[in-house]
Image: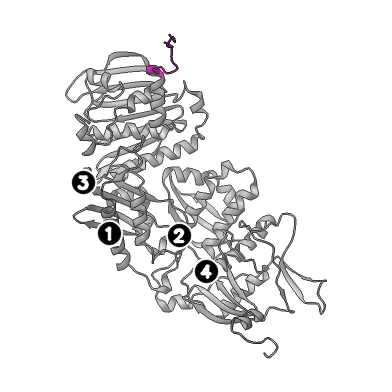
Amino acid sequence: MTEIATHGKIHLLSEEISSRIAAGEAVERPAAVVKELVDNSLDAGSSMITVAIEEGGRRSIRVTDNGEGMCREDAQLACQRFATSKLTSDQDLFQLTSLGFRGEALPSIASVSKFRLLTLPRGECIGTELYAEGGINWTSADHSIPAGTQVEVRELFFNTPGRQKFLKSASTEFSKICHTVQQAALSWPTTHFRLIHNGHAVADFPAVLSCADRFLQVYGNRFCEQSLPVNHESGEGKLEGFISSPYHCRTTRSIQELFVNRRPVKNATISHAIYEAYESFLPKGRHPAFILFVDLDPAMVDVNVHPAKREIRFTHSHLVHGMVKQAIRRPLSQHQPDREHACSTNPHPWLGKQEMRSSQIVFPDVSAMMVQADPSQKDSPFVIRPLERESDHKSLASERASVYSVEQDLDVVPLGQVHHTFLVAQVNTELHIIDQHTAHERVLFERLWRAWTQQSVQTQALLIPEPIDLPPHEGDLLAEYLSDLLTMGLEVERFGTHSFVVRSVPAMLGPMTYSNLIQELLQDLSEWKSVNSLEKKVRPMLASFACQGAVQAGRAMTDPEIKQVVMDWGREGFPMTCPHGRRIALRFSLNELQRIFGRDPKSG
């Protein structure tokens, strides 16, 4: 008889290891710890929440609230896995009204940190202190504290060095925590939030009565002026908040906040509905900014599909999609701009049509261009190329070098515009259809790049310095690189804790919305620490300068302006893509046109 093996390969994990695995799902970084603790504070009915961190949360995180607190028995249970006050039966999972419900936050955090909890119920005199390192050897004691709860998390991931080494820099982790606190503040306007970093108060959002007031606190007056209110209610639910006007759409997704039943989430259904609503208002490559609060029947929402509760599902996603699209479409339709104003970065949307037509685009003279004879050609035609040197590289987009031969001079005959977006011109014997924005953008980029490599960027002081308000983490990021921006011709000064003023810009750039420019530059600056080459750092920045400074789609142009754009584009060598890789033009030679229309080239 064959003997059956009594020792298999499968065994149960220890409580310590399983807790650390659970922590890996719920606690990815310091910001996740802050989110879990703030969620608990909000569920406890707190009207005041203070988040104090050191070294971006890597050294310590302390969240203090004035909520209902816990007795000793509840505090001890709360630090055990799968203990919760939010659920009484499995049916409660389908009617969730609280932020925390899994019963894993505190034990998961405690298993990867040096954890201390102080709590006192309202109406009691003696509170409770619990302490553990790595989630083991818990101790408890009496403690005298104000009513509420304080959780202190020190040396996060001290016992899991593999996780610790994947944390980013203190400034990056701090920015994530800032965003987390900002999201909580937006969603709970009647709660006072404070954020302290390394002993300095960096954000203070006192309690207000409405989402609009909190929106003003967080984003400032300038951004509010560029936004449209949304307020919609139907049988499916309610939606309110703010969206950017078509004038102020962005090249990045930098401000896109979505809350469903006060929970900050990402959801493909709602995002798709928003972009569909913007479809005819949004230029290609642009993105809307939005802060939206969606209230739905909890039975329609499944929040139990992601360990960190960032993603959700809907039982009737098509109904939610339709509601959101309708809600967003209404204010956009009521605010529909004239084509004269459809420019996404038009700095003066309040100008009338006649004023817009008469305004001029800035076309500075070319300063670094050389004309060379092409020895391969008889009759000495000329080739116009950008100045060539070792440091002068091709654009950010991959494109083959192309040289355009012309007679002694460029012969440009402007023929007009199509939809105030595309230029039509005859260039020597060719017909060109040109995207006015990408052509002008490439011209400005090449000139900025040459000036920067020669350390000769000319600046123009603004008659009235432009003020810009930023959230704390973005303000700290911008302040870190002010000297680098100055070498590119952009002079920005700090003006208060998180406010700045733009004093000077590169002289070759025309008027623009400087807040949009700063937002694009912040996106580029956030990646600087991961880029080693100075050239790779600077080129995207100059591309952002050029994009914001170039004439935009929807701008009516006169024939002299059209000719100037085409001439400048030709002097740069007729590159066929903008710095971001978008096509600039279609070109038809005389032979191609004759072939298209069935004409015999010999007969004329």
Read off the magenta span.
Answer: 2-16
Query: On the rendered structure, is 356 left or right of 75?
Result: right
Relative to residue 253, is residue 49 drawn left or right?
left
Which class describes the residues within 10 Å of circle 2: few (<14), some (14-19), or many (20+)? some
Q: Reply yes or no: does residue 326 show up in magenta.
A: no
Between disc 3 and disc 1, whose residue precedes?
3
Label at residue 327: 1
Residue at figure coordinates x 54%, y 45% from the top left: 527
Q: Are marks 3 and 2 in contact (CB under 8 Å)?
A: no
Cα separation, mark 3 vs mark 1, equals 18 Å
Q: Which amino acid type corresponds to the residue marked 1 in the rendered image? A: Ala
First in sequence: mark 2 or mark 1?
A: 2
Mark nearest the camera among 4 and 1 is 1
Q: Identify the element where label 2 is drawn.
A: loop
Frontmost residue, 342 versus 511: 342
Q: Which residue is mark 2?
A: 286
Compared with residue 510, is residue 17 higher up or lower down, i.e. above or below? above
Q: Mark 2 to mark 1: distance in Å?
A: 20 Å
Image quarter (top left, top right, bottom left or bottom right) of the C terminus: bottom right
Residue beneath disc 4:
551
CA distance separating discs 4 and 1: 32 Å
